[in-house]
Amino acid sequence: MNDLMPTPCAWLVCQAGCDERYPMDEVRYRCARCGGLLDVEHDLGALGQRSGAAWRDLFDRRARLAPPPYASGVWGKKEWVCPNIEDKHVVTLLEGWTPLLPTPDLGEALGLPNLLVKQCGHSHTGSFKDLGMTVLVSMVRHLSGCGHAVRAVACASTGDTSAALAAYAARAQIPACVFLPAGRISDEQLTQALANFAVTVALDTDFDGCMAVAAAFCERHGVYLANSMNPLRIEGQKTLSVEVCQQLGWEVPDWVVVPGGNLGNVTAIGRGFLLLRALGLVDRTPRLAVAQAEGAAPLWRAFRDGWRYAPIVAKPTLATAIQIGAPVNAHKAIEVLRALDGVVEVATEEELLRAAVLGDRHGLYTDPHTGVALAAAAKLAAAGTIGRDERVVVVSTAHGLKFSAFKRSYHLAGSGPAPGVAPAGRNAPLFLPADLPSVERALLPLLDTRWPDHSAR
Ligand SMILES: *Cc1c(COP(=O)(O)O)cnc(C)c1O
């Protein structure tokens, strides 16, 4: 299964421009010299000793079938992710290998007949956050293995990071602590952290406020910080791009559209494609589009302003996981978007809701963030930025099952999720007397009108 080449190596490097390097297994999130954020840098010379065709072949041989951890979508690409960790220290829930679903009917309705949806919510904790968290928690276990005992891991979260941290920490039997904005995450996300026995702290503030407390707490008490500023998560999430190409028979889509909050995922996806091209597995890159909620769109403002970025105070949105005004990875994301001719689009509350409902009408189970991405993709198609025949991958970041209240409040009449949103297309249950004539009277007309052209197919 493994190789005939020496283990490639990786290190941490300051990305603020001072180029200071640190070993991968040093507990450090910022540069000691200038305070800049860190990145993982790989030894491209060593990785380049294997040809693009040989990498494709290795990744294809490992796909799903290899012994763990290599059956994981992330660890099947271990040399590109975190080569230094011993296999026995890898903490995996066999994340990755989520479906890349062709959705031609939904695509047609959005003006993008070549649409595919990358179903990242079909993962252990129901969001793409698993891809990064497996790497971070594996590093914590590796650190303990080399004598740097870590007391606990902690994060601030808009809901999905805490669910993933709780699960992977429990898998590794490491104490975890999560800081959540009280009342601003879904019941399902809160339940996930509780069920996996993370110490769960609800603070009366927003995500940005939780982040400040979590960072200070970790610094003072030697607790390992699991947030987006930790560069290891990007390394795991990067494998999403490799997996998409692999699922397309090593072809590259024309566009990838992804909802963005802290902007770690778009950074990871962009870097994944750049690495694929640099190492010769593919010969081109896609364009990227980041989708933001209109009231929480600091990146969109930067895009409009010649990529000049300034943080904002984010307004509440149904897409709670991307209600972030001061994204940690803004500068990394802008660099990647510039390299890949990227764009940014926004969706209003009404647009994201309509797109999510449309997705559900075509058999998906759409979370609000994927609603933002679908709506933005449709707007970019309508504006001619995305060509009608281009192959577009929309990254669905979470499973709709984590957002039941979002769906219930839409469909159950009288409790609209957002003022001003038209109730068209609601599907409330019919409360009827328990006799056949009443049921027939109410039901039969609906059966004939709900899918008007189904028999023509
Ligand atoms: C975390 C998250 C995002 C945003 O990802 P970033 O890397 O912070 O930009 C989008 N959607 C869902 C469902 C998420 O959990």
Image (cartoon, grey):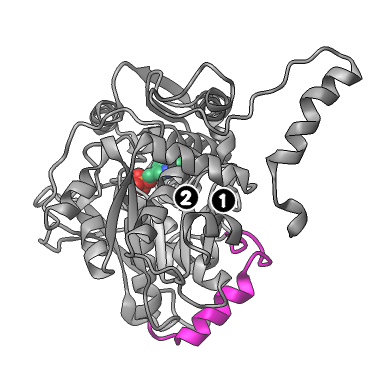
Height in image: 47 above or below 65?
A: below
Height in image: 221 above or below 388?
A: above
Amino acid found under the numbered disc labelled 1: Thr
Q: Which image quarter holds the N terminus?
A: bottom right
Q: CA distance from mark 2 to mark 1?
A: 8 Å
Mark 1 — residue? 92
Say whether residue 63 is magenta.
yes
SS of the residue under disc 1: loop
Q: Nearer the viewer, residue 28 or 94?
A: 94
**Dot label at residue 138:** 2
**Residue 284, percent across and down?**
37, 80
- Whether pointer 2 and pointer 1 mark residues with C-beta atoms closer than 8 Å, the reply is yes
SS of the residue under disc 2: helix
> Which segment is the magenta one?
48-72
Amino acid found under the numbered disc labelled 2: Ser
Q: Nearer the viewer, residue 38 or 283?
A: 283
Q: Using residue 227 as the reference point, say whether residue 426 is left or right of it.
A: right
**Residue 325, percent across and down?**
23, 36
Height in image: 96 above or below 183?
A: below
